[in-house]
Structures are given as structure tokens and as C-alpha cells.
Image (cartoon, helix red, strand yellow):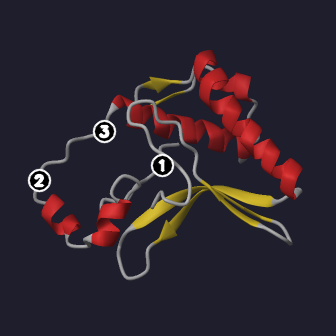
Amino acid sequence: MTVEHSDIIGGSSCERRMNCPGSADLEAKFPDRGSSKYADEGTMLHSVMHKILWEDSAPGDLIGYRELGQEFTEELLDELVQPALNCFDNLQDEYGEFEFTSEAKVGFPGTDGFGTCDLIGANDDFTFINDWKFGRGVKVKGGADNYQ
């Protein structure tokens, strides 16, 4: 399950697009630099999270799963996926059970751009939008100051 991404706007270009919408036209004139192994690993890990949370796969059963040339290993489970699953469990412990969807495609009004919400959840009292951060190549800080 490879997640589709917009050519117009994405996580790393979001702030630039918001501050300079014309940057998309300028960047379109340059050749695509392709993806990095870090981005491919992150995409694969997002797919693993989707399989665990949405398709109800057992994390250990996904060891050996491959996507974009990346393999899900026990090390990745322990280092990156299990802490994310703990975060999900902590949300339920703190805010109660909630219904959710995973890897939901969302549009940006007035553009052909779109993005993917890693997790959208809600119950009668709260709404959650969660962005998994699995990066190991370029440090990305989450929180309110992150335009993603």
C-alpha cells in the first residue's frame, strides 16, 4: 500500500507553498530528484501503521513486509512503530475510545493539491489529527509550529 502524494503540496513543501504559492510553478521546471531511502522507509512505516490500526494486522506478523525497497524489521518495530502504537493507546487511555480512519486523503481548497492524514479520530468530546513522525534522515519537529 504505497501512499499517494500530491506533486503540488506535501509535508516538506507545505510551509513554502503557504508563504509563496508560486513556488510550485517554479519547482515544476526542475527535474524530479526522486525519493530518499529515509522517505521511502517513512512511507513503508506509515503503511505498516495503517495495516496494524486499520486492517487489524499483528505487528509481529508484518516483519519482512517490503515496500519501496524497504523492509519492516524487528528493529523498526521496537524503535519506531511500538512507540507510535503506545502513543495511540495513550490517546485512548486519556481521551476515551474513539472511531478513526487511517491514511485519509484530504484536499486543499482552491488547488489540485492534496495530502494524507495519518490518523483522524473522534469521539463525542474530542477530535484528533495525528501525524506519525518516523524520520531518521532529516529531523522534523512536530507540534503547533509545524505547518504539516
Mark 1 to mark 2: distance in Å?
23 Å
Amino acid beneath label 3: Ser
Say whether disc 1 or disc 3 marks the residue closer to the N-terminus: 1
Mark 1 to mark 3: distance in Å?
13 Å
Amino acid beneath label 1: Val
Mark 2 lies on a secondary structure that is: loop
Q: Which mark is residue 30?
A: 2
Q: Is residue 38 left or right of residue 76?
A: left
Q: Is residue 134 left or right of residue 61?
A: left
Mark in the foreground, 1 or 2: 2
Q: Residues within 10 Å of mark 1 (few under 14, many from 20)?
A: few
Q: Residues within 10 Å of mark 3 (few under 14, many from 20)?
A: few
Q: Is residue 7 left or right of residue 102?
A: left
Say whether disc 1 or disc 2 marks the residue closer to the N-terminus: 1
Quarter of the figure with residue 8: bottom left
Residue 73's spot in the image, x, y percent?
A: 58, 19
